[in-house]
Image: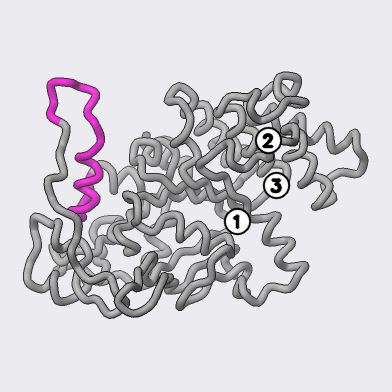
């Protein structure tokens, strides 16, 4: 069966020559519309998370590799195919205020897609769809409709953008740091709204975050990026509870403990000094890794099959190497019911 959305060996390089930066390197993944899933993409700033999202949205073109929508390269889509793509793939961004025009009432962000995509048979039908979408994300239409963006809280604005996405009944929502700019008290409410769309409307999510805590709460599968390279991937329960790659271990250790008597793990390593040009060799994490070996500085490690995860580290070189097809299987093995039961 043709995947709904697929990335095949995608690499994105910004700049050229000595100033070139590899934002994403040889990344493959697929999303199928008959098996909704929530996949978290995690990593620190500069790891390539937002570049990945922009490639999936068609905002950026890959330097090499392909992004395919229903088997067709995004670059080659016809006008009608691109219209379908824009409806079926939606995005929720980090800043819940930046997506609004302050001169328009918030109704505008909801009525525009209804009109543009001809979602309603009448004005009344469109209004009813808007109100149902708002109620689905936990908002009372009477409390938000008719108001300007500055009159609403950050949490309300973010949930309205989720309601806007829901109106289009997409197959996939790319959520790029959707809770990083709202109060901690509202994060659970917004995450619950995303889970409602997943459970009740069978919408897949690509959840992009630097926060492994929220990734653990919402995702089924976890992909960890470091400087554009996939270093570990697998079921979120396994990756978070038993991290194998030294970088993933570092991310886990950086999560503050709720017990003040326990020390907070510190990253005392320095930023990587490896060349980041397209011709660079070796593991990108080598200069920060406590387990670095000579081969780490000379050869980029392949991904090894460790348990149910894929780990790009020579510590596991006695394990079988993961192919692209294996990797796609690893990042889509379990469904939400299994993960929910385990949690």
Report if residue 268 is visible in the image.
yes
The answer to whether residue 71 is seen in the rendering is: no
Quadrant (top left/top right/bottom left/bottom right) for the C terminus:
top left
Q: What colour scheme does the image use?
A: one colour
Q: Mark 1 points at which residue?
A: 34
Q: Mark 2 points at which residue?
A: 102
Left or right of 25 in this view: 157: right
Q: Residue at x 28, y 60 (%)?
A: 231
Q: Which of marks 1 and 2 is nearer the N terminus?
A: 1
According to the picture, the residue beneath numbered tag 3 turns out to be: 169
Residue 247 located within the stretch drawn in magenta: yes
Residue 171 included in the magenta stretch of the image: no
- Please report whichever mark, 1 or 3, sits nearer to the chain's N-terminal start: 1
Q: Which of marks 3 and 2 is nearer the N terminus?
A: 2
Mark 1 Cα shell of 10 Å, populated few (<14), some (14-19), many (≥20): few
Where does residue 183 sit, x and y in percent of width and height?
Answer: 46, 25
Q: Look at 60% across and 27% down and name the residue there.
A: 156
Nearer to us of marks 1 and 3 is: 3
Residue span colored magenta = 242-263
């Amino acid at each position: 069966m043709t995947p709904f959305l697929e990335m095949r060996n995608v690499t994105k390089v910004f700049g050229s020559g000595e100033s070139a930066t590899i934002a994403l390197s040889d990344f493959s993944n697929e999303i199928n519309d008959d098996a909704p899933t929530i996949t978290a993409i995690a990593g620190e700033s500069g790891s390539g998370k937002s570049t990945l999202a922009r490639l999936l949205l068609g905002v950026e073109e890959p330097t090499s590799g392909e992004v395919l929508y229903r088997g067709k390269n995004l670059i080659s889509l016809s006008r009608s195919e691109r219209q379908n793509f824009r409806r079926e793939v939606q995005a929720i961004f980090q800043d819940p205020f930046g997506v609004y025009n302050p001169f328009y009432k918030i109704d505008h962000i909801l009525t525009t897609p209804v009109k543009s995509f001809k979602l309603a048979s009448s004005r009344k039908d469109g209004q009813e769809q808007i109100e149902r979408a708002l109620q689905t994300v936990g908002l009372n239409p009477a409390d938000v409709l008719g108001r300007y963006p500055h009159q609403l809280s950050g949490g309300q604005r973010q949930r309205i953008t989720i309601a806007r996405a829901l109106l289009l009944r997409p197959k996939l929502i790319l959520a790029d740091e959707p809770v990083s700019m709202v109060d901690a008290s509202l994060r659970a409410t917004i995450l619950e709204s995303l889970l409602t769309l997943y459970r009740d409307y069978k919408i897949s999510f690509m959840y992009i975050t630097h926060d492994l805590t929220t990734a653990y709460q919402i995702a089924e599968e976890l992909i960890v990026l470091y400087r554009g390279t996939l270093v570990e991937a697998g079921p979120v329960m396994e990756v978070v509870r038993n991290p194998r790659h030294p970088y993933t271990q570092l991310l886990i250790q950086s999560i503050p403990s709720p017990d003040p008597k326990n020390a907070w793990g510190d990253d005392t390593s320095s930023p990587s000094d490896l060349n980041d040009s397209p011709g660079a060799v070796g593991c990108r994490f080598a200069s920060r890794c406590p387990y670095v070996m000579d081969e780490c500085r000379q050869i980029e490690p392949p991904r090894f099959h460790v348990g149910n995860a894929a780990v790009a580290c020579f510590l596991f070189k006695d394990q079988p190497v993961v192919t692209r097809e294996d990797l796609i299987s690893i990042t889509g093995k379990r469904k939400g019911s299994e993960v929910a039961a385990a949690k």
